[in-house]
Amino acid sequence: MAKGKGKGPTPKAEDRHWHAKRQRARAVKSAKRTGTPTVGPVGRGKPAEPARQGRPAGARRASGEAPELVTGRNPVVEALRAGVPGTALYVMSGGDERIRESIQIAADRGIPLLETGKNELDRLTDGAVHQGVALQVRPYRYAHADDLLKGSAPLIVAVDGITDPRNLGAIVRSAAAFGAKGVVVPERRAAGVNAGAWKASAGTLASVPVAQVTNLSRQLKAYQKAGCFVAGLDAGGGVAVADLELATGPFVLVVGSEGKGLGRLVAETCDMLVTIPMPGRAESLNAGVAAGIALYEVARIRS
């Protein structure tokens, strides 16, 4: 058979003369669209990877590395008043008194002010109702659970099944008021630290560390091995919080959700279940309120 007259094997795309130019053009277009420029030189038409930022040892960031955005005139100004740690304030030209106050607070706190158009703000907020203003909030850096053991007789608060960030913020605020070393939260099916939690904490999240753990029951057992007495707050508890004499030493108070209370495994892990006597008509208390009452009693006993 006669040999074919083909032109040989087809070259790979990256080996063609036009490939590098096309990839560079795509990188530039992507940078304009996302607002994230490429970093460093571009080799063989491939955009360089973004620079990676280091983290402190033992610290983890919130689930989802992207910064959170608080949108809307009232939410933004309330977040700034509460000391939510913003990293940038995006505003459209003009605005009412609330936007002007937001700009003033951001300026006083050294938060960068970025004037932007409606289309860009729509893109940044993914089409949410922003009313011409948005506050970018940095991802929260969680503490390590073992760091909360520092001190001779630490008081730690653990939360189980709390899904409302406002309840978490209220618990952190009570923890700060009554001398707790920190708060422990599960990674899954639980509220994390976001703008809502910051607002409810009234800024106390800046001084009270929150640790995030993969398994709350396992962490409670680790605290027990470290010498802590673990008490779970439960409506069916046999001892009133006010009578809990063992709270004077290293102590962990576990607070469950308002509806379901403590999970079965968490309740079984606790050394004791304690309750808040309620002679009134209410069957239960909001988790944040219950935590505040219990921590007051614990602080009174420890003092």
Image: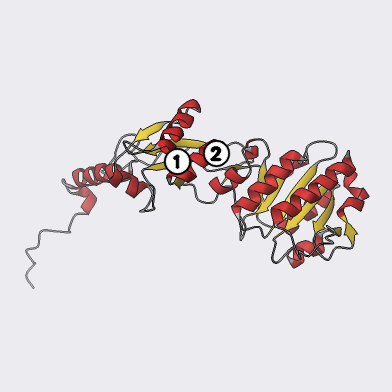
At which x and y percent is residue 220?
77, 54
Q: Nearer the viewer, residue 6 or 119?
A: 119
Question: Which of the labelled discs sits on residue 217, or is there none?
Answer: none
Point 28% across, 46% down: residue: 119
Estimate how packed mark 1 is, as few (under 14), some (14 to 19) or many (20 or more) residues with alpha carbons within 10 Å: many
Q: Secondary structure at mark 2?
A: loop
Q: Nearer the viewer, residue 194 or 25?
A: 194
Tag 1: amino acid? Leu
Q: Secondary structure at mark 1?
A: strand
- Whether residues under marks 2 and 1 lie with C-beta atoms below 8 angstroms apart, the answer is yes
N-terminal-most mark, 2 or 1: 2
Q: Which quadrant is the N terminus positioned in? A: bottom left
Q: Which residue is mark 2?
A: 84
At which x and y percent is residue 225?
84, 50
At which x and y percent is residue 272?
87, 59
Q: Which residue is mark 1?
A: 135
Coloring applied to the structure: secondary structure
Point 18% across, 49% down: residue: 16
Tag 2: amino acid? Val
